[in-house]
Image (cartoon, coloured by chain):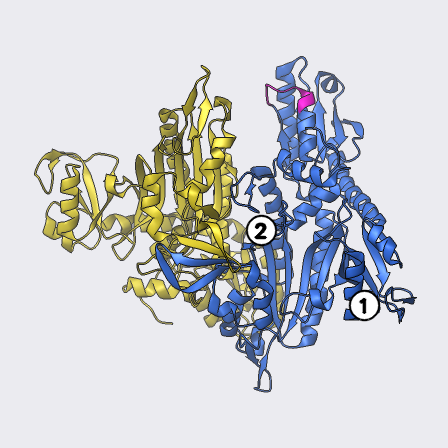
Chain colours: A blue, B yellow
Amino acid sequence: MEFSKENFSEWYNEVVESAGLVDKRYPVKGMHIWRPYGWKIMMNIDNYFREIFTEHGHEEVNFPLLVPETEFKKEAEHIRGFEDEVFWVTHGGLDPLDVKMLLRPTSETAMYPMFSLWIRSHADLPLKIFQIVNIFRYETKQTRTFIRMREVHFFEAHTAHRTFEEAEAHIQEDIKIWKKIAKKLALPYRIVKKADWDKFPGAIYSLGVETVMPSGRTLQIATFHQYGQNFSKPYNIQYLNEDGEHEYVYQTTFGMSERLLGAVVGLHGDDRGLIIPPEIAPIQVVIVPIVTKKKQEVIKESKLIEQEVRDAQIRVHLDDRDNYTPGYKFYDWELRGVPLRLEIGPRDMDKRQVVLVRRDTREKLMVSRDEYIVKIKELLANIQDALYRRAEEEMSERIKNIDNIENVKEHNGVSAVPWCGSDDCGHAIEELTEKKIVGSPIELGEKKRCIICGKETEKIAFVAKPY
Amino acid sequence: MEFSKENFSEWYNEVVESAGLVDKRYPVKGMHIWRPYGWKIMMNIDNYFREIFTEHGHEEVNFPLLVPETEFKKEAEHIRGFEDEVFWVTHGGLDPLDVKMLLRPTSETAMYPMFSLWIRSHADLPLKIFQIVNIFRYETKQTRTFIRMREVHFFEAHTAHRTFEEAEAHIQEDIKIWKKIAKKLALPYRIVKKADWDKFPGAIYSLGVETVMPSGRTLQIATFHQYGQNFSKPYNIQYLNEDGEHEYVYQTTFGMSERLLGAVVGLHGDDRGLIIPPEIAPIQVVIVPIVTKKKQEVIKESKLIEQEVRDAQIRVHLDDRDNYTPGYKFYDWELRGVPLRLEIGPRDMDKRQVVLVRRDTREKLMVSRDEYIVKIKELLANIQDALYRRAEEEMSERIKNIDNIENVKEHNGVSAVPWCGSDDCGHAIEELTEKKIVGSPIELGEKKRCIICGKETEKIAFVAKPY
C-alpha cells in the first residue's frame, strides 16, 4: 500500500481498511463489519465510558431497539427532525404489524415513557443513566467509515433533574467528563453552542464538541443537549416536589459515537498508517524478535520479555510469525499504529539491552534490560502527551480569525467570523460562503463588527464545511 | 412481595422484575428494559465469554444488524426455517427500500458472504470468530423474560475448517468451553443430539445443552451445530488446499443467549428471591452496618472493611442508606441474591469480629477480623460449589427412566424413554405423550425395547415439555 496523508480523504478511506479496523464490503450502504482490531479499540473506548460515567454516578441500562410509531410521535419537533431518516419495520414474518416500529435513531422516545413510570418523587432525582448501543439512520448523503454511517455504534447518557439550574449544572459536569475522555483519546477540540436552527430536534439548546480534520472539515464528536421540559411534558414525566406538588422534570443528554474513532484515525495517523494513543491501544508494545541467527535463544528471550511486560500491566503482543521478515513486521505494526515497538536480537541479548522505537517520532532508543519496563511506561505516557499536543497544534492552525466573506470562502478550515447572532445574518453567512455555521464558541471575543450587518458584536461564528 | 417458588412460573415472572433485573413495561411484546443490576450480571457473563473464547483462539467481530433479503435467501432450508419469524425493514424514511432487509435472527447469512472473501487458502483456516449482539425473532408464542423474547441478547461463534473431521474436533473443543461456562454459572445440564426434524435449519446435526427448570420443563441454553458444507456451497466459501485445488470449507457454530441468565434465575433462586453464583455476581459481598448506636464509629469501620474487601479483589457494596432499617436491607439484598452478607455492629467491633451470612443456606458465622478476608474467599468458593451441587441434584430428580406412554404423559419433568431412533416412532412418541423429544443423550443406555415399536435399542429419547 502506498498512500499519503496529503490526500486526506483517500488516505482515510484506505487506512481504516488496510489497518484492519473494518471491512467495507458488506452489501449494505453505510454498514460495515468491525474487524477484531478495530472492535478492540472501540471496546477500550466503551469500557472507559463505563468507568468514567459510573464514577460520576450514572448507571448503565439497555433499552430495546424498536420504538413503536405511537411513542415516537409524541414530541412534534423531534419527529419532524427524524422522520426522513429512520428505518421502519413494517412486517413480522409474512404479516404486517399493527403498529409499525422504527429502529432507534437515538433513544429519547424509547426511554421517556419509562421515565414517567420510574420517576415519582424528588427522592428519585437526579436520574442518571446511560447505554451503549447501535443506532440507525437512513443517511441519503455519501457515507464514510465511522463518520457518516447508517448503523452507528453509539453512547447516550440521559438525565432528569428537579430544576433547570440543576440540569444546567449537570451539563457543566458532563463537560468535565468530556475533558477526561478527550485526554484519554488525545483529541483536541473546541466546544461551541449550535445555532438555533441547527440544534437537536426538541432541545432548548445544544452544545457541540467540534474537532477539525486534516481536510479542513469539522467533525462533531460529542453533543450536550438541554431539553428543559420539552420532553417531560409530552411524555408526562412528573415528580412530587417537597411541597407535595407535581412538577415536570428537566432533562439533558450527552451523546458520542464511533466518530471518536474516526477522529483518532484522522488526527493522529501519518503516511505510514494509524497511530493509536497508548491509553486506548489494544497493543501498546509489539515485540519483534530479530532472528538472523540464534533463533531459539532469541525467541525464548522474547517470550520472557513478553511476560515481564505483561506483568507490568502493559498490553503487549509478541509477533513470532515465522514466515515474515522483521522489515515486513515493522511495516505491518506501523500501519496498525502500535505506539511502541520493541526489538530484540542476538546483539541486544549480548549487551543486555532492548531497542525501543516510537511510532509517532520513529525515534530509536537502546535501553538496558534493568530499566526497560520503567522506560516503556515513560515513553507510553510521553507518546500520549505528544500526540495530543501535535494534534492540538495542527488543529489550531486550521482555525483562523477572518472577517471578509471572500476569505472565508477560500480558507480551507474553520473561519472564526464576527457575527451579531441574528438568524438573518447567520443564514446570509451560510449562503454567501457556501459553508455552515458549526456553532459559536462560548467564550466571547473582542468587540468587532458583524461580517454581514456591521453591528458591533463580541460573538463569533465558526464557519466551515462540516462532515 | 410474597411469593413462593412452588408456583414456579409466577415466582419467575415476578422475581426478574422485583429483584431489579428488567422492567417488563416496555410497550412492545417480548422486549424489555435491562435495568442496571440485570445488565451488570449479563455483562459479567459476556466478559467471561470474551475471556474464554479468546483463550481458545477466537477473535471478536461485530457484523451489521440488517441482512438484505437477497443474501438471506441463498440457503433454502435456512430461509424456510426462519421466514415466518423475522422482522422486515421495508422503508427508509418515507421511501420503500429497493431491497428489503431483515433484522438478523442469527448471523449466518450476514457473515458467510464475507467468509467467501476472507478465506482464500488453507493458511486462512481454521477461521474462528465470535460476536455478542442482539438478535430479533418475531415470536408468536407467549413470551417470557430471558427465555422467549423478540429481542434477544445473543452470543454466536462461527468457525470454518478444512475438513469435516477438523470441524468435528472443533465441536468437541466447544463442549470443553461449554463446561467451563457451566461451571462459572453453576448450571447443571445434559447434552443431547437433536432429533433430525428438530435440528437447526441448514445443519447436518445439532447438539443442544438442556437444563430442566423447577417447573419440569426443559430449557435449551446452548447449541452446537455441524454445518458441513451446507452453507459453504451456496455462499461459495472455498479455499485452495495444499494440492492447489479449490475445496468448500466445513463450518460449525456455537450459540448461547440471555437464556443462561434465565436458567441462573430459575435454578438457583428460592422463596426469598434470587441467588446469584459468586463468580458472576455484580456484588459478591454486601456490608450492612448495624447502627443501633455509635453510628459514626460503625459507619467509619464499615468503610474501612469495604476498602479491605475491595483491595482483596472482591466485588463489594456498602449499604449505608440512612432511611432503611438493617432488616429491610437484609430482605432487599436477599431478594437480589447477593451471595454473602457482612454485618458489623458496635458489639462486633468490640470483639474485633464480623458476622457473615450465606445467602444460600442462611448460615451465620462470627469471624475474627484477623481472618475474615480469607474466610470470605473460602465461603464464596463454597457457595459457588454448593449452588451447582444443589441444582444438579434437583435437576437429576426431574429426569426419570420411563418406558410407558401414560407415565411419560404424567411425569412432570424429563422422561428418558427407549427409542429405536426412527422418525415414525419419534413422531408417535410426541403425538401420544403430547410432549416433545428434546433430544437423545450421546451416551447410549442399556439394551431396552423401543416404547413404540418394541425393537431392541440402546438409544434414549428425552421427552419433555420444552420452553
In which quarter of the view is residue A434 placed?
bottom right
* In the image, residue B456 lies in the stretch drawn in magenta: no
What is the spatial separation of the Cα atoms under label 1 and label 2, in whole angstroms? 36 Å
Q: Secondary structure at mark 1?
A: helix
Nearer to the camera, B41 or A39: A39
Residue A153, disc: 2
Using the rendered image of the protein, determine whether residue B382 is visible from the camera's viewpoint.
yes
* Above or below B59: residue B385: below
Q: Is residue B334 above or below residue B191?
A: below
Instruction: In the displayed orientation, state which residue is furthest to the top.
Output: A293
Characterize the local packing of mark 1: few (<14), some (14-19) or many (20 or more) Cα atoms within 10 angstroms: some
For the point 8% across and 39% down, which residue is it? B453
The amino acid at mark 2 is His
Image x and y of residue B18, in percent: 42, 67
Give the magenta-colored segment's residue range.
A321-328
Q: Is residue B231 left or right of residue A467?
A: left
Residue B135 or residue B20, whichever sits in front: B135
**Main SS type for the magenta part?**
loop
> What type is the residue that disc 1 sits on?
Cys
Indicate whether residue A325 is drawn in magenta: yes
